[in-house]
Amino acid sequence: MTDQSHTHFITQWTDTFSEQIHSRLDKRNRMAEAKSLAYKTGLKPNVKSVDLSKRYELKSKEELAAITTDYQFAGRAMLVRDFGKAAFVMVDDGYGRMQIYLSKNDVSESDFAEYKALDYGDFVWMRGFIFRTGKGELALHAKEFKLVTKSIRPLPEKFHGLTDPELCYRMRYVDTTMNPESRDTLRKRSQIVHFIREFFYDRDYLEVETPMMHSVAGGATAKPFKTHHNALDMELFMRIAPELHLKRLLVGGFPRVFEMNRCFRNEGLSIKHNPEFTSIEFYEAWATYEDHMNLTEELLNGLVMKLYGKESVVFQERELSFARPFQRMTMRQAVVTHAKISVEDTRNPSVMIDLLKKKGHDPAKLKALSADRLMVMCFEEFAENQLIQPTFITEFPTEISPLARRNDSNPDVVDRFELMINGWEVANAFNELNNPTDQLERFADQAKAKAAGDDEACDVDYDFVRALEYGMPPAAGQGIGIDRLCMLLTNSPSIRDVILFPQLKKETFFEEH
């Protein structure tokens, strides 16, 4: 029988400790013997490294010598240069780096003993004054020094850092410690999200939070994750989209709403896909999808200008221009342009089947599809990856748009656009379907497809149909993928680069016996 004792769970971990870890544990033990806590609290910094640099970078050595202000500074020791009775310690406080100088002659005996227990990677606190070193570098001269947190596991070798991408994603806490560019990318993501939120606040949108567990999977065509609620004894689905709840709010008298939402789709992983992802969805009564094209241009142009002070960014050696207006074309026009066929050919199944066969698609399965579905496949195969600059694609077939409003002059298409950038779908928007009879029929089509084996089709959401029966004002709604947008605006080649903790295979710590 496998040992499940308290001791077993501890020793199976500590048995893996290296000699370096044991050396650090010995130092921690010596601190304890000296009545010094290896994990202190209550010691706070009162200044950031960036503030010190801005304040004093232009001051001369003589000018700094006249400054008597004491600063309290704290962070992680990233480099230790020991000279026996003195040392320089490079400290990273999360905002930048600053050197600390300490001498045995200037700190207490107990403080210097704490320094002697210091290892690369420990967290430290000091109190002292600013000065310039003999090499002309800014530094803080310590009057007090404390080792605040003893790091028992060594960080990677300081000059090469953590370079294995898989380990960077799995141990993000080490990645962001060792790789400033990773930290900068993830900070920039926060700036992007902040800007987007403020953009909608400024336009009188109400931020809301809607359920993440649904009794009916809907709002998008995707395979959901399932879970079970024990107390209610019912199956639930993790949210694949917040759309239907947000539109219920339009029914309920909230004319402008948005949600910065987490969604879950039980699908594959790729450089553009993570099963848990972030998007913003926003809905506006009395607006049209054309209004949202203009709004989206304003949002993205303003965001790029805020981040970089210009209207373009470079992504993987391609310059992407967010200057307004963005290019606009219908899906049919895109297929004609990039598949090199005529408009008439986009309505001819046999022509499109021949094209798709060359891309490896099964002819038998293709023959079961409508001309509109074949056109969509041709768009995906021939046009999508050619749409590098921001481009709005419009006039999607009604058949593939179960929640969008039919176009008044051509009911075979819906009032919808997708924004393509770098060959990726970044945003999806449409005039919302508010005819409950039409919505019920489309739900029924989806439910029929699901019963036939389509695991991405949605069920009938009768409560949503009931909500529409009370009346929903004409409206436009849109979703923007935050993760992909962050990739483009931070020049990150993988979605995992812009997600703090991306989904990975479960790590195996111990060999199975």
Image (cartoon, rainbow, N blue to C red):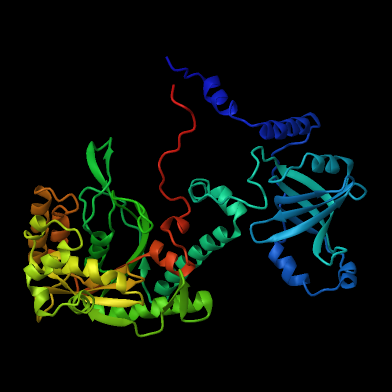
- Residue furthest right in the image: 105
Q: For the C terminus, give its image quadrant.
A: top left
User: Which of the 4 image quadrants contains residue 251?
Assistant: bottom left
Across and down, in percent, residue 217 comes to 21, 51
Residue occupying the point 69% across, 66% down: 50
Q: For the N terminus, give its image quadrant.
A: top left
Picture layout, residue 44 above or below residue 204: above
Picture layout, residue 305 above or below residue 433: below
Picture layout, residue 294 above or below residue 134: below
Is 225 situated left or right of 125 in this image? Answer: left
Across and down, in percent, residue 168 comes to 52, 50
Is 290 situated left or right of 13 in this image? Answer: left
Along the line of sight, the residue nearer the viewer: 290 or 155: 155
Residue occupying the point 54% across, 25% down: 12
Along the line of sight, the residue nearer the viewer: 220 or 352: 352
Is 389 situated left or right of 462 in this image? Answer: right
User: Which of the 4 image quadrants contains residue 31?
Assistant: top right
Across and down, in percent, residue 34 comes to 81, 32
- Residue furthest top in the image: 1
- Residue furthest front in the image: 358
Is 392 situated left or right of 189 in this image? Answer: left
Q: Is residue 79 visible?
A: yes
Along the line of sight, the residue nearer the viewer: 32 or 187: 187
User: Which of the 4 image quadrants contains residue 418?
Assistant: bottom left
Residue occupying the point 27% across, 63% down: 246
Across and down, in percent, residue 394 comes to 22, 76
Q: How many marks?
A: 0
Q: Is residue 286 visible?
A: no
